[in-house]
Image (tube, coloured by chain):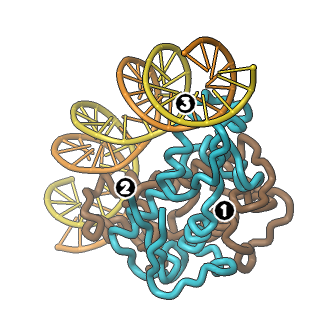
Chain colours: A cyan, B brown, C yellow, D orange
Amino acid sequence: MKELRVLEQPCCAPGAPPLAKGSARALAERFKALSDPARVSIVNRIAGAGEVCTCQLTAPLGLSQPTVSHHLRVLKEAGLIEVARRRGTWTFYRLVPEAMEQLAFAIGGGPVPEGALVTRERAVAS
Amino acid sequence: MKELRVLEQPCCAPGAPPLAKGSARALAERFKALSDPARVSIVNRIAGAGEVCTCQLTAPLGLSQPTVSHHLRVLKEAGLIEVARRRGTWTFYRLVPEAMEQLAFAIGGGPVPEGALVTRERAVAS
DNA sequence: CTCTTTCATTGACACCCATCAATGTATCAG
DNA sequence: CTGATACATTGATGGGTGTCAATGAAAGAG
């Protein structure tokens, strides 16, 4: 599918070096996945619960099942969430913590939290 | 215009509490401002230079002046940038660091950097 | 005042997106 | 096999968005 390369330095914080065109596009793509209130809420609920299935999202969001499924697809293709497990007809999604951390790091949100050592440019699955 | 309230806790990091509908909309609005490669590049260049005028952006972005002006307006209305000063016919823009920090904090990007103490919910100009 | 430069706004166009109803697919219970 | 449940996909539709040419507005040079 696609790749997002981990930036060596924050790109959108004071003092940042110029950004390559490809990096700008990759970042914008991930921000776009968070540019809808429904998807922000979905990410929020998944983050809070650890794992969530589609049927647990339609009611609190007030959206139809196809619409929720659509948003989940967008988030998945952006690499922000992934399928945790399938149990019967249920599909459980979970966060991809590294993706969120990378976004926070890109806009200058302090050092990347534990574990996510950034050396040069590391390709990350999505 | 509008307001973005500072969250008490990260909303999109593991263990986050449920998010109010208004907060989700406010966050999505700011992420949407960063959902275009041109605007990511603009923010990046402003961050790197401190201050930048419109005419310094058209060439490197490969966009017409009206288009750049449009993107600057979107970023300004999202509260991510602001007019630093007007010198003759030049208009210089600068970042609003608190806005970026708040975004980074929201998605769990570590503690808010220096100065931006978050108590409960503080209204912030935009 | 007149001309030039810089920026913002308007109007138009093509394209993208969020949403839902309808349909398809897969799994389990009986 | 039959029916029910959870989810994904397709198709249609209304609204939003990025882009530029053309125009307007403001400030300085001469």
Element at label 2: helix
Disc 1 target residue: B107
Q: Which quadrant of the rendered structure holds the N terminus of chain B? A: top right
Disc 3 target residue: A66
Q: Which quadrant of the rendered structure holds the C terminus of chain B? A: bottom right
Q: Quadrant of residue D27?
A: bottom left
Instruction: Please check whether the numbered discs 3 and 1 fall on a single chain.
Output: no
B41 relative position to B1: left or right: left
Mark toward the start of the polypeptide (1 vs 2): 2
Q: Give the residue displayed 67% in from the left and 57% down from the top.
A: B125
Q: Is residue B26 visible?
A: no
- Residue A44 location in percent, x, y? 70, 51
Disc 2 target residue: B69
Q: Chain of mark 1?
A: B
Q: Chain of mark 2?
A: B
Q: Residue furthest right?
A: B120
- CA distance for labels 3 and 1: 26 Å
Q: Residue furthest bottom?
A: A119
The answer to whether the residues at label 2 and label 3 have Cβ atoms under 8 Å apart is no
Q: Which is nearer the eye, B27 or A45?
A: A45
Q: Is residue A78 visible?
A: yes
Q: Which is nearer the eye, C29 or B97?
A: C29
Q: Amino acid at mark 3?
A: Pro
Q: Residues within 10 Å of mark 3 (few under 14, many from 20)?
A: few
Q: Amino acid at mark 1?
A: Ile
Q: Quadrant of residue A61?
A: top right
Q: Give the residue displayed 63% in from the left and 65% down from the top.
A: A97
Element at label 3: helix
Task: Point out the frontmost of discs 3 and 1.
Answer: 3
- CA distance for labels 1 and 2: 29 Å
Q: Give the residue displayed 50% in from the left and 46% down from the top.
A: A74
Q: Amino acid at mark 2?
A: Ser
